[in-house]
Amino acid sequence: MTGFVCPECRSSVVEGEGGYKCASCGRLYPVLFGIPDFRLRGDLYLSIEDERAKAARLHDFAEKHDFRELVGFYYSITDDVADRLAPLFAGYVMHAADRARPSIEALRSAGRGDALLDLGCGSGGALVTAAGVFRDRTGIDIALRWLVIARKRLDQAGLSARLVCADAEALPFPEGTFTHVLAADLLENTRSPAAAIGAAAAVMEDGGHMYLTGSNCRWVGPHPATGVWAAGLVPQRLRSALLKSKHGIDILRAVSFVSPGSVRRMGEAAGLQQADARPLDLDASNLEHRSALFKALARAYAVLAKAPVFRPVLLAAGPVFQTMFVKEKTL
C-alpha cells in the first residue's frame, strides 16, 4: 500500500513526530489516537476543534468499555439525534457489518484486485465484512469521532485496517491507489456529491470498480430514518419544519439528496462507466430493531426489487438505489 499525499496541493508528505508535513506547502496534519487527520475542513455538524474534543471523550471511554457500550455512549453525548431515534440509530450501527455483505460481495465479484477504499466508513462495519476478501483495507471518514468507534470495532473483532480522517472530496492518496471503492450512504452526506465521486475516481486504478448507494430524491414514501414523507421532494424549509415538529431537530439539515440519473452523470463526468444500476439489494432478515410496519414494507420491497417488471420503477422512484461504476482505461 502506498503512502499519503497532501490533499491541499497533491504533493508528497513527510512523516515526522506527531504527524505528517507537506513537502511543498508546509501544511501539517496530526495523528490523533493513532489516526492520521488529513482534513482541510470539518464536517457539517461540528468544527474540527469541537469534533476532536468529542473524539477524545470517545477514545477515553473506549479504553474501559466494549463496542456496544461505546455506541451507546456516543448517542448519550450527541444532541443532534432525538432521544426517540437514538436506539434506531444505534441499532443501525450495531448491524453495519451484516448490512455491508451485499456490497462487499458485489465488489468482490466485479473484478480483480485487493485494495479496498471504504469512503465514509463510519463505524467500520464494511471493513470487518471485507476482511478475508480484500487484503488491503482503508477506511476514511470526515468524522474522527466515528473512526475512534471504528477502531474499537476492529480491535474487538481482532482485525486491522488503515483508518484515515479525511474529506471524501479531498482524499490524501496518490492516483491509482485502489482497485475497489465502496461508497455506501455517502453521497447525501457530502457538500458536493459530484466532487466526492471525482475524488474517488482519481484514486482508483484504471479498470477499478466503484460501488455506490444513495437515497433517491424522487421517493415519495417515508424516509427510512426519519419517517418524513417525500423528504427529497418537499422544499427544504418545509422539510425542516416537519422534522423539528416530529423529532425536535432537523436531522436532515446537511443532507444532499441525489437520484440515479444524477449519479450516473456525475460518474461519467469523472471518467467512470456505469456497469449496473438497480434498486438496493436489501437483506430484509436483519431488521429486528425496526417496527413491524417497517419490516413488512422492507420485505415487500425486497421481493419487488428482484422482479423484472418492478425493478425499473423502483430504480427511478424507489427509496434507495445502488450503482456499479468501472473506471475507463486511459490511452
Image (cartoon, rainbow, N blue to C red):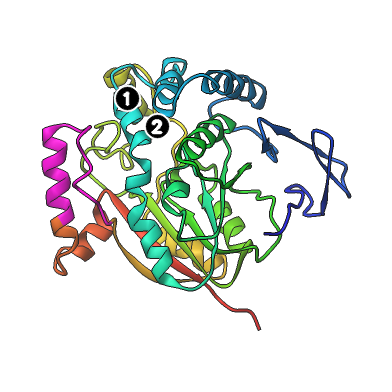
Q: Earlier in the sequence, mark 2 or mark 1?
A: 1
* Distance Cα–Cα, label 2 vs label 1: 8 Å
| Residue at 34% over, 20% down | 244
**Residue in view at x 54 percent, y 65 percent:** 114
Reply above or below: 19 against 2: above
Q: Nearer the viewer, residue 299 or 135?
A: 135
Residue 140 placement, left or right of 88: right
Q: Which residue lies furthest to the bottom in this view?
A: 331
Looking at the rendered structure, the kind of residue marked 1 is Leu
Return the residue at label 2.
252
Q: How crowded is mark 1: few (under 14 residues within 10 Å), some or many (20 or more)?
A: many
Q: Using the rendered view, name the quadrant where residue 167 is placed.
A: top right
Q: Residue 293 carries which label?
A: none
Q: Per the image, is 232 magenta?
A: no
Q: Residue at x 13, y 57 (%)?
A: 303
Q: Is residue 183 above or below residue 85?
A: below
Query: Where's residue 255, x and y in %?
Result: 44, 38
Residue pictured at 28% horizontal, 19% vertical: 84
Whether residue 331 sits left or right of residue 247 in the image: it is: right
**Residue at which label 1 appears:** 243
Q: Which amino acid does label 2 sit on?
A: Leu
Tally of numbered discs: 2
Residue 320 image offset from top left, x and y in percent: 30, 51
User: What span is in magenta?
Assistant: 281-302
